[in-house]
């Protein structure tokens, strides 16, 4: 019996690390996850995407991966943070420049910590988003449905994954974004 849980992870970088330029860092991070016992099932193409928020730094290289791990979600997130640290990630500024960003987007169809909390963070008013960060793991990622830099690569590896609260697939969420946002993510 396979006890691996499916995970969707968004990868991004806009600063060089000890592995080299951002694309090299993303590849090295995937290798580090594999070496830690995570099964790398699929990796998207790499995309050049505008920095978010605009003006916060150089543009990004983004990707997405479908991974399998026997670790529970909180332990898996800890692993992602350790790998980020291996490549110089420092958590000093929300939405700032970074050598590596590994965002846990989803753990199968899990809703964590509960539906009400997930819905509240997903519906957080725009003005509060830059100022507030959750103190615990919330899945699916509350902003994934708004971000082309997540959905474009995620569509390469999990187009049919369905958001357990919105009832929409990755492909449907991506199609709902403005065309200019989708077109801003260009394969590298």
Image (cartoon, rainbow, N blue to C red):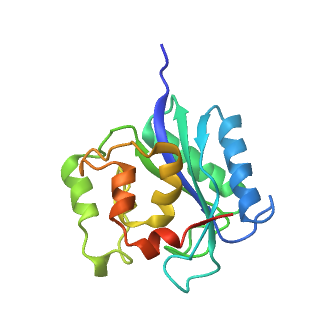
Image quadrant of residue 133?
bottom left
- Name, please, the residue furthest toward the bottom: 55
40 displayed left or right of 8:
right
Question: In the image, is residue 72 above or below residue 47?
Answer: above
Question: In the image, is residue 153 above or below residue 93?
Answer: above
Residue at the location (61% across, 81% down)? 57
Question: In the image, is residue 49 above or below residue 28?
Answer: below
Query: In terms of depth relative to the viewer, which is nearer, 175 or 65?
Result: 175
Residue at the location (32% across, 64% down)? 176
Q: How many marks?
A: 0
101 displayed left or right of 20:
left
Residue at the location (63% across, 53% down)? 45
Residue at the location (37% across, 77% down)? 131
Q: Is residue 137 visible?
A: no
- Name, please, the residue furthest toward the top: 1
Q: Is residue 64 visible?
A: yes
Residue 188 x/y as whole percent: 69, 63
Query: In terms of depth relative to the viewer, which is nearer, 59 or 100?
Result: 59
130 displayed left or right of 79:
left
136 displayed left or right of 35:
left
Residue 101 x/y as whole percent: 58, 60
Residue 146 x/y as whole percent: 37, 66
Residue 24 x/y as whole percent: 76, 57
């Amino acid at each position: 019996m396979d006890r691996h849980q499916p995970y969707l992870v968004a990868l991004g970088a806009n600063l060089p690390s000890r592995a080299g330029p951002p694309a090299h860092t993303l590849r090295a991070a995937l290798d580090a996850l594999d070496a830690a016992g995570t099964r790398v099932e699929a990796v998207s193409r790499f995309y050049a995407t505008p920095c978010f928020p605009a003006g916060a730094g150089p543009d990004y290289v983004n990707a997405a991966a479908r991974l399998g791990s026997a670790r529970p979600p909180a332990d898996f997130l800890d692993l992602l943070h350790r790998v980020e640290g291996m490549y110089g990630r420092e958590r000093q500024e929300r939405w700032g420049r970074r050598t590596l960003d590994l965002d846990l987007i989803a753990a199968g169809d899990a809703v964590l910590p509960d539906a009400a909390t997930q819905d509240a963070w997903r519906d957080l008013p725009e003005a509060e988003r830059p100022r507030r960060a959750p103190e615990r793991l919330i899945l699916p990622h509350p902003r994934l449905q708004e971000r082309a830099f997540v959905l474009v690569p995620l569509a390469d590896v999990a187009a049919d994954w369905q958001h357990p609260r919105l009832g929409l697939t990755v492909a449907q969420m991506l199609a709902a974004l403005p065309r200019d946002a989708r077109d801003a993510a260009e394969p590298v």
